[in-house]
Amino acid sequence: MTRCFVTAVMRHETNTFSPIPTPVADFGRIGPTDGPARGDEALRVYANTNNPVAAYIDIAAEEGAELVFPIAANAHPSAPAPGEIIDLCADAICEAVQKGCDALFLDLHGAMVTQAHDDGEGDLLGRIRAIAPDLPIAVALDFHTNLSAAIVDNATVIAGYRTYPHIDMYETGDRAGRTLIRALNGEVNPVMAWHSLPVLTHMNRHAPSMQPMKDMYAKAIAAESAGTVLNASIFGCFPLADIPHVGLSAIVVADGDKDGAERLLYDILNEGWERREEFVFPVEPVEKSISEAKALDGGPVILVDHGDNCGSGGNQDVMAVLKEVLRQDLDNVCAGPFCDPESVAQMIEAGVGAKITLQLGGKVDMPAMDLKGEPLKVTGTVRRITDGSFTITGPMFTGVKFNIGRCAVLDTGKVEIVVSEGRYEPFDVGAFTHAGIDPARKKYVLLKTRQHFRAGFEPLAKHIVMVSGPGTCTSDYSLFPWKNLRRPVYPLDPDAESNLPTQS
């Protein structure tokens, strides 16, 4: 008898301090949208891409199963969305499940907060479990998951990304999906052990390719590769969320051996706690970072403005770092994209070849951080105008078609500035090449990003300089007005104690 599988996407990384609103209309395919994709449209958007759900699609085909894809809701990182988005996703998924299915395969983020829920994924899974208490459910989660009891208690199998930038998204779906298939076939009996530490890791210090996470993840990967466990995942956490369950966490899925899963879990997280100081990223003044970059030989020098990273909910229009680049007179620079629809419209109206003076960026205030937007007066020539469309060729989201709204390039003589209508973290060189700029030929490349730039730009970088500009993604956690975060938590509370259970 042919099996029936249901799959769905619900992803949003929520920065609770972000001033960028997240209407339901933003939960469509990547780029300007009119809301979640459904059915054949969802399948068309996600098939053959580097996404967990693409692996689910392929697994269903291999298994000869009917696949139902009721909804795909995916929004760019920003402020909490209306609670309605959980209702839309839950209703669509539950309706499909109630029609009859053998398994559910979910592609979730793990750090979704709405105006009504501090644990969007946990709430979604709880609603599904209420109508299907015995349904096998596989869940693929982002590396920046804030793991909660509600997520774990309502899933059968969980696997998380092992990379940051996230280049193993398809692989993660494959890992979760194939474990669930083995469970469906009666080959394994998944049991899970998990824990969350009171540690707010810094995102510039917790990538699995870097220490101390590298050693921790080596243990998880080795155990999974050897077949000692079915899946083992570590979550660096998304620390820019003022909710109780933020923290460095891990989950181990074992074949009936709960004690073995707990031993591996303790070993991994105990190392994380012992090395917690290594997860802290020290900030330095912007002018010092740019001065040091100016003294470097060769290029490209990648300047990483991580305090205003729209991929973590930033405005993408804070001008402090570009202002310092201009003040220190760096030459042969490309920069952006900066999100400023007003300036894009002015450049389009002026036309290619026109000389124009703009009050660039600084259009959005950041009340949670007590920061006012400060436009930067800049004069240059309009070099190019584009529709903002390009296809990702790099290793993250490979094959996905992006549209960041209309774009225009302002050339000051020393700096080519890409300005866009939409927000986009530049993890692929297409943000520049589609506008006729080759970043490999520049001495300096200024990006609003944190780690995802490494997917597309690290291979061409001679040097990388992290620049601690202001914004709602700052690495100085003391600047956030915390209200709901669990306390004590490290490093805000240096004397915080581990909550790991004692091992016998």
Image (cartoon, rainbow, N blue to C red):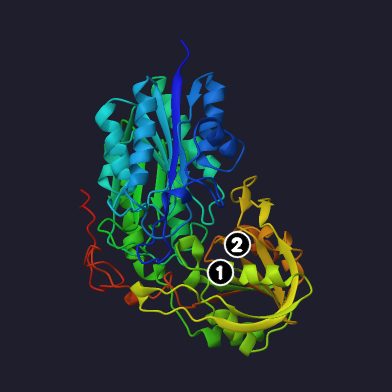
Tell me, for residue 448, which label it has, or none. Answer: 1
- Image marks 1 and 2: residues in contact by CB distance under 8 Å: yes
Number of other residues with Cα within 10 Å of mark 1, as a class: few under 14, some 14 to 19, many 20 or more: many
Of labels 1 and 2, earlier in sequence is 2
User: Which image quadrant is residue 333 in?
Assistant: bottom right
From the top left corner, tell me how far across and down residue 493 is, in percent.
25, 73
Q: Amino acid at mark 2?
A: Pro
Q: Which residue position is annotated with label 2?
A: 426
Q: CA distance from mark 1 to mark 2?
A: 7 Å
From the top left corner, tell me how far across and down residue 56 is, in percent.
51, 32
Q: Is residue 371 above or below residue 449?
A: below
From the top left corner, tell me how far across and down residue 108 is, in percent.
42, 43
Number of other residues with Cα within 10 Å of mark 2, as a class: few under 14, some 14 to 19, many 20 or more: many
Instruction: Name the foreground residue: 392 vs 462.
Output: 392
Element type at mark 2:
loop
User: Does the rendering let one see residue 211?
Assistant: yes
